[in-house]
Image (cartoon, helix red, strand yellow):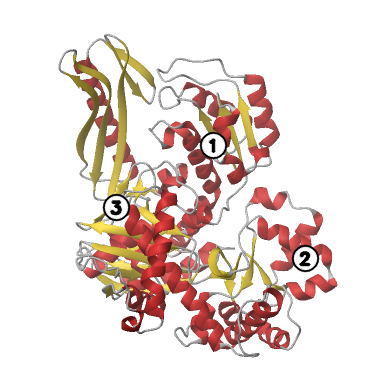
Amino acid sequence: MSLLLGIDAGGTYTDAVLVDGQRRVLATAKSLTTRFDLSVGVASAIDQLPPDLRQRIGLVCLSTTLTTNSVVEGRGAPVCVLLAGYDEAAIRSSGLADLVGPDAIVALEGGHDATGVEIQPLDEVAACSAIARFGSRVTAFAISATFSVRNPAHELQLKKWVESLCDRPVTCGHELASSLGAPRRALTAALNARMVSHVRVLVDSVQSTLSDRRIRAPLMMVKGDGTLVNVETAMQQPVGTVLSGPAASLLGACALTGLRDAVVADMGGTTTDIAVVRGGHPALSDDGARVGPWRPMVPAARVYAIGLGGDSEVRLLGGKGLAIGPRRVIPLSLLGHQHPEVLPVLARQEQESPHASQMRFVMRLQSDAVSVNQLSDDERRAWDRLCQGPVDMERCNLEDRAMSRALARLERRNMAIYSGFTPSDAAHVLKLSNHWCRLAAVSGARIWARQMRHLYGLGTWTQGEETAPCQDVLRALYDQIAEKLLEAGLNDAGQLGDNQTGRLATLLAQLAVQPSHARDVAAASPVFQLKFSPDMPLIAVGAPAASYYPEVARLLGVSLVLPRFGEVANAVGAACALVSQRVNWTIAQPARGVFRVFEPAGPRDFDSLNAALAHACAGSSALARERATRAGAADVHVSLHQSDNVVRNDIDGDVFFEATVTAVASGPPVMSTKPDSTDRP
């Protein structure tokens, strides 16, 4: 019988599992993710699996949190955004300036109106000039035109010009989203373009690793809605893989526990992802799930993703207290584990007067050819130095200021990463974790505590004490996790906006958690008691979950489930996913007696509603089936759903405004029934 290989590439670990046809876990493996060369971590994880089982692999399913992490942390490859028909107000409301920078946005004349009629022609001269100017400086182009979901002609024309003038990938807004809302559609296109090179690197790494081991099986990737697509489709629309890892973890949590109704929290190195599961399936958000500060316009599991993980930097919050995340750093315990040569440096820094560059090392993270080619001489020298190992910023600041400034610029470009003090380090100090170097964590805790006291006036810890500071760090972590669990529950209720939900969750967390820290709830005599539903247990998965969530569950009084193999739940979920494609076609009535179907090729008019609906049903079904088959589905089944916007009046009768036909094509992934594999390590 063919086996399924599930792989999850996370910010800290790469996981691999082998699952049989009954979705039983046969073998698991974990390896540190090697961002500078992802194939190293992927190969290490696969090579830990039993060789005899590797020969039976019939399908490889890949999920990743790397795209989610890049959105949460505000990182990504350089892109150019071409906007047709946008005014300054629409550009401001899109948030593009915060995402890509104002210099990367090019506003052009053009665009259509709500009925698909051209407002003004595209400015070809300005467009081609911008494409030529940015072609060698970016990794991809993002294109969005007003009302492109009603008529994509201008986006398609801009795409042709890009393809004729340079060899960069192109993302069009109408290819990703079918809903109105030009600013968010432009943001979604930009997010997609920023991820293209990163997803391509990941897919290439996995494919080369499989090829080297002669594992000949289809490779598919999990999307943010928990369904599978082949990697060719995923590389064209990588924004669809935002929340890929979280969606896979939801499927894995349900598969590992057998529970169908639960709150699932997946904690990794960079993010914590929380979702409510009912009936064994995560709820979907057609309007897009919130990922950090953004809400890309792609269907996804209704996951609440926040920058809070085991490797999140512990920092000062506005001079008032501790905050954790959203920036990920290399934990000192991991740094000491991988590079023992830093231990004497940390020991020396314990004895020095505190300053900000202590325990701050720089390591290479990732790169792309475009970014490397744009490095200045100082940055190239710094990049070459990073290839030799971690750089001590304290020493670099004293001996080579030009290099220290260049290293800082590389970090801002996501090509390098700092080390820092993290919850993972605190857990090692308190012996809740033991997989990395505790000695480095202890040194880091002492240095960090002195920095907080003497530089920022925070804390009253004894000189040289490491236990009490780490207890305070984990208390802050528990508080943040509890608050986000409450916020996710309020979001699930859907009664409040994001800002109101956040403020109420903060207040509820203070009422629920603070008295519990004293472990004497009776003494507090609370007027209110906050309780989670007994029918909705908390399933905690991810590598750090067992270290932190027992205390979180105690504070909130919620039933906790820590499933076996929960540390690789993402990879298990990837192996359990199905293929599905969704197509939405809209019908509107721009004039009396005219029914306009907005299909991908452009608008088409009919003289009756029945004819328009019949065309939309047939066309969307055929397109969904075609996309599902192309995405790698077998035995495709198509279901149709229709939503109408009709005003009913006793005098005037029914007045039709708009209808949306949704075709969903689903099926199991195609597998190699007889794997042709002569696997070798």
- Residue indicated by mark 2: 404
Q: Identify the mark nearer the N-term, 2 or 1.
A: 1
Q: Nearer the viewer, residue 237 or 595?
A: 595
Q: Name which of mark 2 and mark 3 comes first in the sequence.
A: 2
Image side of residue 587 versus residue 480, left or right? left
Marker count (numbered):
3
Instruction: Give the distance between the C-alpha atoms of the residues marked 2 and 1, in whole angstroms.
Output: 36 Å
Q: Given the image, on which type of amino acid does mark 1 rest?
A: Ser
Amino acid type, mark 3? Ala
Image quarter in which the N terminus is found: bottom left
> Can you give x and y, in whole percent of width and height, for residue 216 in the image?
37, 58
Q: Nearer the viewer, mark 2 or mark 3?
A: 3
Q: How busy is the neighbourhood of tag 1: few (under 14 within 10 Å), some, or many (20 plus)?
A: few
Question: Residue most toward the left?
Answer: 650
Which x, y percent locates residue 309? 48, 68
Which residue in the structure is indicated by mark 3?
Answer: 493
**Cβ atoms at labels 2 and 1 below 8 Å apart:** no
List x then y, in percent, for residue 44.
47, 72
From the image, tell me which residue sits under label 1: 93
